[in-house]
Amino acid sequence: MQFADTNVLLYSISTDPAEETKAERARQILGDRDLRLSVQVLQEFYVQATRAGRANPLTHEHASALVESFLRFSMQDTTKAVLLAALTTRARFGISYWDAAIIEAARLSGAEVVLSEDLQDGQDFGGVRVENPFK
């Protein structure tokens, strides 16, 4: 099972010609029915997709509709278990809390791989491995 980080969702909506290859790859990833996401990933997507400083920011309505469409994937809620596990992972591996929460949401959802451009490609976080799908 694979878990997608926020950057996969953001690349899927990119209209930047310099990101065309990444956008195509992101859309391929989102075509996989077995993909997993978390509420945190959807929250981050909404904030980044609509922020005023973004080139071509999405409207609230468009971003909200996309968030709703992403609910078709298996979803890991943000829970006390995610929070507590993320605190431990943050301390153990020296990563940000938010990255640790992604790792732990993936783990609790049953995913063994996190697809992310933001974390170190190939790093194993106690049984959850990071793969950069855009390299």
Image: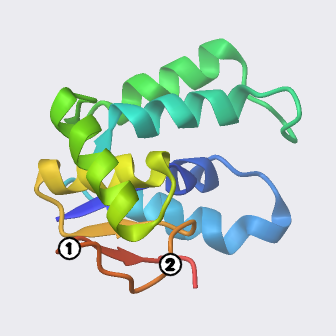
Q: Quadrant of the C terminus?
A: bottom right
| Position in image of residue 29 (x %, y %) | 39, 63
Residue 23 in percent (x, y) is at 62, 62
Query: Where, by quadrant of the figure, is residue 54 drawn?
Result: top right
Instruction: Tell whether 43 sits left or right of 78.
Output: right
| Residue 37 falls left or right of residue 126 | right
Please tell me whether residue 35 is drawn above or below residue 113 in the rendered image.
above
For the N terminus, the quadrant is bottom left
Out of 63 and 42, give the one closest to the viewer.
42
Q: Is residue 112 above or below residue 5?
A: below
User: Which residue carries the number 1 mark?
Assistant: 126
Q: Nearer the viewer, residue 109 or 133?
A: 109
Residue 96 vs residue 102: left or right?
A: right
Helix, strand or loop under label 1: loop
Q: Position of residue 116 (x, y in %)?
A: 48, 66
For marks 1 and 2, give the one nearer the viewer: 1
Separation (CA) of disc 1 from disc 2: 14 Å
Q: Is residue 105 visible?
A: no
Q: Is residue 45 visible?
A: yes
Residue plotted at (82% across, 57% down) = 16
Type of amino acid under label 1? Gly
Residue drawn at x 23%, y 70% is 128
Say which label, 1 or 2, has the lower sequence index: 2
Q: Residues within 10 Å of mark 1 (few under 14, many from 20)?
A: few
User: Hey, which residue is sitting farthest top in the picture?
Assistant: 61
Classify mark 2: helix, strand or loop.
loop
Vertical placement of residue 133 versus 58, above or below: below
Per the image, the residue denoted by label 2 is 120
